[in-house]
Image: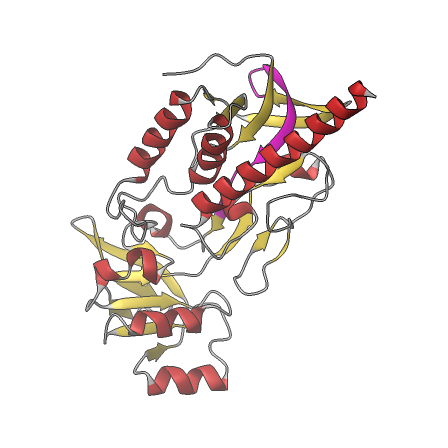
């Protein structure tokens, strides 16, 4: 089902993942006209099953999104397939332009376009991403418990990741890859926790029967593995926000960037809000809560504007 895009809405939501749909659902339930415009390129596309989401553990991300779309539509919201290429302020409203030439006006803009994982350029790695190559012990760790797990040294979070996975398996190997490796304190912790340290760059993944079985190092050494964990650099899909002068900033802990916003998702640009991983890398599952919270804040902002206009009209 594809909804027809109307000329104007209270809120246009850019991005139809859990954050965008949660924000749209919250707005639609308070009788706001809302349209979600989604390009259909979710970060979760390679993942067959998601984990750690209460009452939805093991569900496919695709099914979750389809259910979310149906719920938004059930309250009168629109979900439109399309790629947003530009957004500009037009007086008191915004004009949102799509790649196919369509445009729509909105009183408020909610950007929930998500993030991109910048993966190492290792042959075979990208094809395994979200399967037996992944980034999070909470999302994937249970499924590889007690297996041979490798951790690729791609940045400062790698040692922390190795220590986290050691809780799930006694067979964990930290590959320094192209990094400087762990510092002295991290090396001491890894040794004490029983994590094997292997120097050298990983140059390829060995796959058999559509399963990861090993990694190959630059010197030809082959190390058997069942899974490989990576802490990639994560960057927001923020090209749309750059037009408003909003630039990503480094996350204080995770290797990556996010768009600065207050706890409600309000950005420095009046009328422009953001939700989900684009403003908080640390809580992927919390993207749904972020969208709900921001949707409620946008409704409150619109109500305040409407009350102000009503008071002015009576004077």
Residue farthest to the right? Answer: 315
- Give the residue displayed 53% in from the left and 25% down from the top: 83
- Give the residue displayed 47% in from the left and 76% down from the top: 181
- Up/down of 82 relative to 207, above or below: above
Residue farthest to the front? Answer: 315
Task: Please provide percent x and percent y for residue 230.
Answer: 40, 61
Task: Please provide percent x and percent y for residue 258.
Answer: 59, 51
* Residue closest to the eye, 119 or 248: 248
**Magenta includes 106?**
yes
Residue 226 visible at all? no
- Up/down of 184 relative to 35, above or below: below
- How are the colours assigned in the image? secondary structure
- Position of 211 with respect to 97 (left or right) is left
- Up/down of 33 relative to 227, above or below: above
* Residue closest to the eye, 248 or 95: 95
Figure label count = 0
Q: Quadrant of the N terminus?
A: top left
- Give the residue displayed 66% in from the left and 27% down from the top: 87
Give the quarter of the image for residue 40.
top left
- Position of 163 with respect to 8 (left or right) is left
Residue farthest to the left? Answer: 209
Q: Quadrant of the C terminus?
A: top right
**Magenta includes 300?**
no
- Position of 78 with respect to 54 (left or right) is right
Q: Which residues are magenta?
A: 98-116
- Give the residue displayed 51% in from the left and 30% down from the top: 27
- Position of 196 with respect to 75 (left or right) is left
Task: Please provide percent x and percent y for residue 13.
Answer: 54, 30
Residue 44 visible at all? yes
Task: Please provide percent x and percent y for residue 125.
Answer: 35, 52
Q: Main secondary structure of the magenta part?
A: strand
């Amino acid at each position: 089902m594809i909804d027809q895009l109307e000329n104007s809405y209270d809120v246009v939501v850019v991005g139809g993942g859990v954050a965008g749909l949660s924000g749209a659902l919250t707005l639609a339930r308070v009788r706001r006209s809302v349209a979600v415009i989604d390009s259909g390129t979710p970060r979760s596309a390679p993942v067959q099953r998601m984990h750690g989401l209460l009452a939805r553990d093991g569900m496919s991300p695709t099914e979750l999104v389809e259910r979310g779309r149906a719920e938004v539509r059930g309250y009168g919201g629109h979900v439109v397939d399309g790629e947003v290429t530009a957004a500009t302020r037009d007086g008191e409203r915004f004009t949102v332009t799509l790649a196919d030439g369509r445009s729509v006006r909105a009183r408020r803009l909610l950007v929930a376009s998500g993030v991109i994982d910048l993966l190492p350029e290792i042959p075979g790695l990208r094809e395994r991403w979200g399967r037996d190559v992944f980034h999070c012990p909470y999302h994937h760790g249970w499924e590889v418990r007690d297996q041979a797990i490798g951790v690729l040294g791609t940045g400062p979070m790698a040692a922390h990741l190795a220590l986290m996975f050691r809780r799930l398996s006694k067979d964990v190997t930290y590959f320094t890859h192209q990094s400087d490796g762990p510092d002295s304190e991290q090396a001491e912790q890894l040794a004490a926790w029983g994590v094997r340290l292997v120097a050298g760059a990983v140059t390829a993944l060995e796959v058999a029967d559509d399963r990861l079985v090993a990694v190959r190092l630059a010197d030809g050494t082959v190390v058997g593995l069942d899974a490989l964990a990576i802490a990639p650099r994560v960057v927001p899909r923020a090209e749309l926000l750059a037009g408003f002068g909003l630039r990503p900033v480094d996350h204080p802990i995770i290797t990556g960037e996010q768009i600065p916003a207050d706890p409600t998702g309000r950005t420095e640009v009046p009328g422009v809000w953001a939700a989900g991983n684009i403003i908080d890398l640390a809580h992927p599952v919390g993207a749904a809560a972020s969208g709900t919270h921001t949707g409620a804040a946008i409704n409150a902002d619109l109500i305040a504007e409407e009350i102000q206009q009503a008071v002015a009209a009576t004077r």
